[in-house]
Amino acid sequence: MLLIKRYPNRKLYNTRGKCYVTLEQLAQHIHLGEEIQVHDYLSGDDLTTLTLSQIIFEQEKRKMGFLSRSILANLIRFTADVNPLRSFILSPDGDAHSIDDEIKHRLAFLMSHQLINADEASKFENLLIDEYQSYSHPKEDEVLVRVKEALSKRNIPTQEQVTSIKQKINDITNQIDDHIKENI
């Protein structure tokens, strides 16, 4: 986990890299799958959520974000009643069903306002649910490729590389032991 300290001047300090970082650089770490934690330098308070919100704000400001107005508006609406939002976001087994239900609910709304017909709604429902499922459940091979790429970018050896290095160390140790035994 990458620990960041936020100073009173709002500068962010990467304790691992021993350098100051920008919100954009933190976003790059997150895109690579790295967990971050941000603490106030003086008080020690956890500022991770605030910092993540700032990253989203900056991305939206530069039009790099992906959040639509309706998603942002619904997020604000949900803040009045956090429990439904929390259960929607955090439900470990119900995520797919929650998304499926949300897709169906929104399509029903469009049909009730006669913006689409039943056939179009059915086509959209199948398309959206299939797209969500393929995105949210990548194939195991795809995940392994992504993990290996992330490890490679960070110069972190894979399990196979570590095993190979251990074997080479054992081989060299055995050769040294054999050489010592021969010369005694």
Image (tube, rainbow, N blue to C red):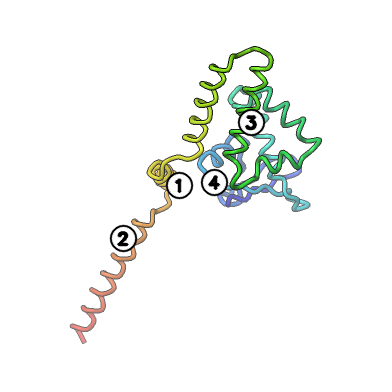
Where is mark 2, residue-wise? Answer: 164
Q: Quadrant of residue 19?
A: top right
The residue singled out by tag 1 in the image is 154
Question: Which comes before the other along the chain, label 4 or label 3?
Answer: 4
- Residue 166 x %, y %: 34, 65
Q: Residues within 10 Å of mark 4 (few under 14, many from 20)?
A: few
The residues bearing labels 3 and 1 have C-alpha atoms spaced at a distance of: 38 Å
Query: Which of marks 1 and 3 precedes in the sequence?
Result: 3
Residue at x-position 73% and y-position 40% = 84
Q: Disc 4 or disc 3, which is closer to the eye? A: 3
Q: Secondary structure at mark 3?
A: helix
Q: CA distance from mark 4 to mark 3?
A: 29 Å
Q: Residue furthest right?
A: 80
**Above or below, comparing residue 145 to residue 165 in the picture:** above
Label 1 sits on what residue type? Answer: Arg
Q: Secondary structure at mark 1?
A: loop
Q: CA distance from mark 2 to mark 3?
A: 49 Å
Residue 97 x, y percent position in the rendering: 59, 38
Instruction: Give how far apart the Cα atoms at labels 1 and 2 are.
Output: 19 Å
Picture coordinates of residue 107, whole percent (x, y): 62, 22
- Which amino acid type is shown beneath numbered disc 2? Ser
Extreme residue in the top direction: 114
**Residue type beneath disc 3:** Glu
Query: In the image, which is nearer the foreground, mark 4 or mark 1?
Result: 4
The residue beneath circle 3 is 102
